[in-house]
Image (cartoon, helix red, strand yellow):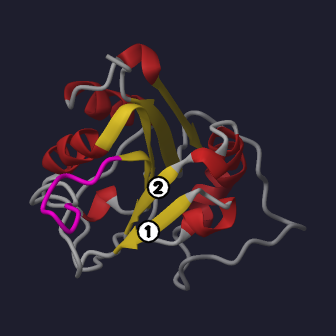
Amino acid sequence: MARRSRQWVRGLKPETLDVIEISGSWGKQFGFCSYEQIWHKQHDICTGPVLDKQQQVRKVDLVLANQVWEHLDRPVEATLNVLEMLRPGGYFWLAVPFFIPFHAAPHDCSRWSARGLKNLLTECGFDPDLIRAEQWGNRHAALRNLELEWPPVYDPETDNLENDPDFPICAWALAKRSSA
């Protein structure tokens, strides 16, 4: 997930992008033109888009949400709010778990496969032809997620990283808002 997503974001020319990241810091690595983290305690994305100082909707080129959407009570509303924040041609990248243990922070509400993410994004108004969605996982990683100490620490000697589409651990998507 991380490798593929970094490729996608780097392909967007990060130095030219104004970015908001929702409840995370994954985006710090890219050298965006501007970058702001919006934490849940600052703003609940389910209640409305992020506003600027004049109480206008903040318009950005990219919104990032890494391992956040599974915790939202109203992910459809949140996605609609993100769409409103995007400039024409802007992007929304999100990554979510699929097969991992329950982890309330403070809630754990939803799981999506790559197809499920594409469906969610399409239902919220993104053009399905402008959505890339993928997933990764395998039986070995699924079994590791059942260990008592979680999350399991990656062991390059024993952990298989080959993808098995029938056992997704995580899914991610990059959706582009139409330019019209």
The residue lying toward the viewer, choosing from 150 and 3, is 3
Residue under the point 27% across and 54% down: 58
Name the amino acid type tagged 2.
Val
> CB under 8 Å between callouts 2 and 1?
yes
Residue under the point 52% across and 72% down: 25
User: Which quadrant of the figure has residue 125?
Assistant: top left
Residue under the point 53% across and 52% down: 169
Q: Where is residue 171 in the image (x, y as percent from the top left)?
A: 49, 44
Above or below for 59 versus 145: above
The residue lying toward the viewer, choosing from 77 and 167, is 77
Q: Position of residue 180 (x, y in %)?
A: 31, 16
Name the amino acid type tagged 1.
Glu
Label annotation for residue 19: 2
Label annotation for residue 36: 1
Q: Position of residue 120 (x, y in %)?
A: 27, 34
In what element is the residue under mark 2? Answer: strand
In what element is the residue under mark 1? Answer: strand
Question: Which comes sooner in the sequence, label 2 or label 1?
Answer: 2
Above or below for 26 versus 119: below
Magenta stretch? 51-59
